[in-house]
Image (tube, rainbow, N blue to C red):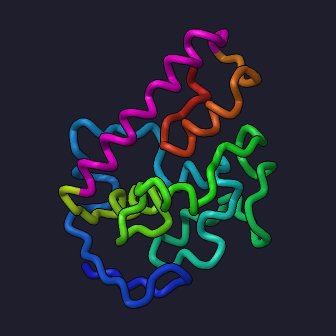
Amino acid sequence: MKIIVNDAFQKNYIYELVMPAGKGFDPEFEPDLSPREMLELGVFGGAYFSDGHEEFPADWFLHAKLSATGPDPNLNYFKVSASQPLAVWQAKGWIYPDDPRGWFQWYCRYYMGRRVPAEDARQIKRWKAIRRHIGAIAKHCRPGDMTCRPKQRQALLHWAYDSRRM
């Protein structure tokens, strides 16, 4: 199945879904949360898909915490800002041209069944590197203490790690 994207970031971008949604993940990539779960919990201040999200299933957005006026940390699960501006990601070269919004856009498309082998490997490597924050929470926080290191916990949610389990 081919997907055609026309939004504020991409015009006539076409990609193909080659796997069933939520299936066929690289064995090293085991996210705790689906994109729908992340959006429902509250990530990216609700501003990630503020200009449209038609390429993804409508049910992802039924209970999503979205902002029409820009990032709002109060929409995040931990009520803190844990994001850097897109310009920072662009300056560091972390943005793949086909996913101009960044990692979460890549994850949503990967979850839906798009595969881009070299980019998938790069993003999975980045996802694995975020695990260092799990170690910091384990070292400095009592299990279940959601008030301990909320920025790190929110950042982990942004990368599909369920920091509520720690």
Mainly helix, strand or loop, the magenta region?
Answer: helix
Q: In this view, does 120 lie above or below 51?
A: above
Instruction: Give the residue drawn at x 27%, y 65%.
Output: 114
Q: In this view, does 100 lie above or below 152?
A: below
Rendering coords of residue 122 (x, y %): 28, 49
Q: Is residue 40 left or right of residue 23?
A: right
Question: Based on the displayed image, in which of its 4 quarters is residue 19 positioned?
Answer: bottom left
How many marks are shown on the rendered structure? 0
Judged from this view, the residue extending furthest toward the bottom is 12
Instruction: Give the residue drawn at x 46%, y 24%.
Output: 132
Instruction: Give the residue drawn at x 22%, y 44%.
Output: 26
Rendering coords of residue 133 (x, y %): 52, 26
Instruction: Give the residue drawn at x 56%, y 83%.
Output: 8
Rendering coords of residue 125 (x, y %): 31, 40
Question: Based on the displayed image, in which of its 4 quarters is residue 137 positioned?
Answer: top right
Q: In which quarter of the image is the C terminus?
A: top right
The residue stretch that appears in magenta: 119-143
For this rendering, which residue is in front, 94 or 5?
A: 94
